[in-house]
Amino acid sequence: MPSSIAPHNIALIPGDGIGIAVVSAAMAVADRAAPGLLRTQTFPWSCDHYLQTGRMMPEDGIDTLRQFDAIFLGAVGWPARVPDDVSLHGLLLPIRKAFVQYANIRPHRLLPGVDGPLKAREFDILCIRENTEGEYAGAGGRVHQGTPDEVAVETAVFTRAGVERILRFGFEQAMGRRRMLASVTKSNAQRHSMVFWDQVTRDLAAEYPQVQVSHYHVDAISARMVMAPDTLDVVVASNLFGDILTDLGAAIQGGLGYAASANIDPTRKNPSMFEPVHGSAPDIAHLGIANPIAAIWSLAMMLEHLGEAPTAARIMAAVEATTARGIGTTPGLHKTDDITAAIIAALEE
Ligand code: IPM
Ligand code: MN
């Protein structure tokens, strides 16, 4: 039953490809777990929308989304129809920036019954990816285009405010977990931004003496995530490093079909956005075999953010009961609808 008086208003952006099927699966689970808890409005913003209107979302799209308590997004991108840089810079990336969703939280652990590629079975990593600046800041340009003298510059931007707030968020998460924080840089090669990041990490570490802090270079922590993932707890990384490490995290947890994410504005001044890490997967979009678990896990993260922790926990328990039975654990073996139905049945057990 809904635990709050008013339903939460959720903007749904199914987007492209398998985004549509997994959003519908997640909403079916939400409906059964807590009827009436979410009041949803669906927006058709996608590559198709771009082809029809010339925009991924309307000019006032951000203002429209601002009215909602949260945003639930499937996937954006269909490169055969619209170049990825156009579709992503027209929808997903501006939402993250406009709503200051500076903390991108991505959990990596094995669900019961899922055979990851590693020997290690017990790991529980929480990647905290900076989500508004760094290598994705958008500072740069091209000159002398198309000539042999062409120059392309893409400058990463690290602000003290931006680095401090993401690291502080990581320390706070670590305090609620196993109290270990791995800070990811490449400060042996990048001597300005990354040495600065290390410095801010050390300054904050003094405020959190209970947290055991490790500094890793991004190449070294990539190897560690494969060789000794159980030695990691909270991992804090810049936008691009976090992007790469969370696909690796998805791989060690069995695949992109299990990788959930939350784009959070911790100040709660703006709506946060929840989305599976996988993309639109045009190659399997019409086969009905997309794994809805990453989206359903993201739904659980959204409910927790909205103060509905008991419902979130029930949903995760149903997901785990389902994978423990071998449903949704082998790519392509079960249909999206069958996995969703099994999770709904488990909710009612
Ligand atoms: C992700 C995606 C996006 C990113 C792309 C689609 C722009 O890979 O959410 O991890 O790089 O942030
Ligand atoms: Mn990515």
Image (spheres, helix red, strand yellow):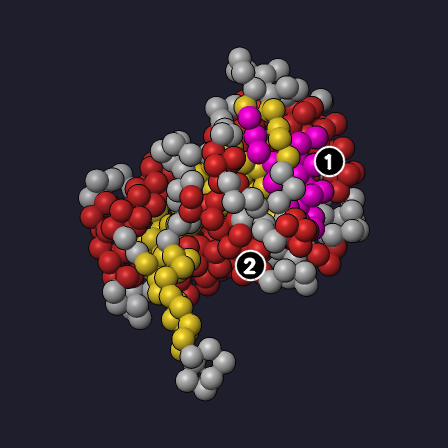
Which residues are the magenta region?
A: 9-28
Q: Residues within 10 Å of mark 2 (few under 14, many from 20)?
A: some
x and y percentages locating residue 75 in the rendered image:
61, 48
**Visible in this render: residue 265?**
yes
Residue at 45% of width from left, 61% of height from top?
222
**Visible in this render: residue 296?**
no
Residue at 69% of width from left, 48% of height from top?
18
Image quarter for residue 140? bottom left
- Left or right, residue 134 beside residue 210: right
- Type of amino acid at the residue the image marks with label 1: Thr
**Between discs 1 and 2, the one toward the N terminus:** 2
* Relative vertical location of residue 319 with respect to residue 157 in this rendering, above or below: above
Q: From the image, tell me which residue sits under label 2.
A: 86
Check disc 1 and report its element: helix, strand or loop. helix
Quick one: 270 or 147, which is closer to the camera? Answer: 147
x and y percentages locating residue 266 in the rendered image:
38, 35
Quick one: 40 or 24, which is closer to the camera? Answer: 40
Is 23 magenta? The answer is yes
Count up the numbered dots. Answer: 2
Residue at 53% of width from left, 57% of height from top?
248
Q: From the image, tell me which residue sits under label 1.
A: 340
Residue at 66% of width from left, 32% of height from top?
27
* Relative vertical location of residue 12 with respect to residue 279 in this rendering, above or below: above
Q: Answer yes or no: disc 1 within 8 Å of ligand 1.
A: no
